[in-house]
Amino acid sequence: MTTPAQTESTEATQAPSSVVLTDVAAQKVKALIEQEGRDDLRLRVAVQPGGCSGLRYQLFFDERSLDGDVVTDFGGVEVVVDRMSAPYLTGATIDFADRIDAQGFTIDNPNAGSSCACGDSFS
């Protein structure tokens, strides 16, 4: 049985998660970081102005910590989203595809009203 005080305490310790990294994507990120030979890198996901549809995704390795960053750990892989990008990425799922018809990281974003054919930008 959970008391209201226990529930509040549990909720207060949970970090807000803006994105989800699938297990396959986490394994790929971990392998890429190992190839870099650095243990201070994290995957930063950001939304920047540009692209065909107005906004585009950026995924890159970063060692910086910025004020307001949302950091979520996925099996030893830290994903960092800056505070300006977080509202655009809430609920988004990052996966890694290695198929004949698709290769690389993919982002399934429920906040995207529309996207371009290349899949790199959205509005």
Image (tube, grey):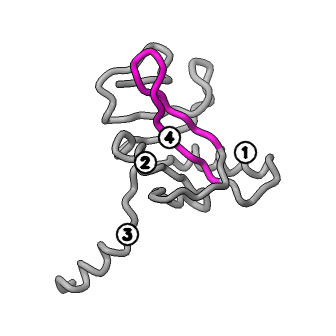
Q: Amino acid at mark 3?
A: Gln
Judging by the rendered image, the residue that carries numbered circle 3 is 14
Q: Which residue: 31% across, 35% down?
A: 111
Q: CA distance from mark 2 to mark 4?
A: 11 Å
Magenta stretch: dominant secondary structure = strand
Is residue 105 magenta-colored?
no
Kindly identify which residue carries mark 4. 46
Q: Amino acid at mark 2?
A: Val
Tell me which numbered mark, 4 or 3, is placed earlier along the sequence. Answer: 3
Which label's residue is closer to the chain start, 2 or 4?
A: 2
Name the residue rendered at 72%, 45% in the picture: 32
Q: Residue 60, percent across and down?
A: 63, 41
The residue to which callout 2 is attached is 19
Q: Nearer the viewer, mark 4 or mark 3?
A: 4
- Does dot 1 land on a helix, a strand or a loop? helix
Q: What's the CA distance linking mark 3 and mark 1?
A: 28 Å
Q: Which residue is mark 1?
A: 32
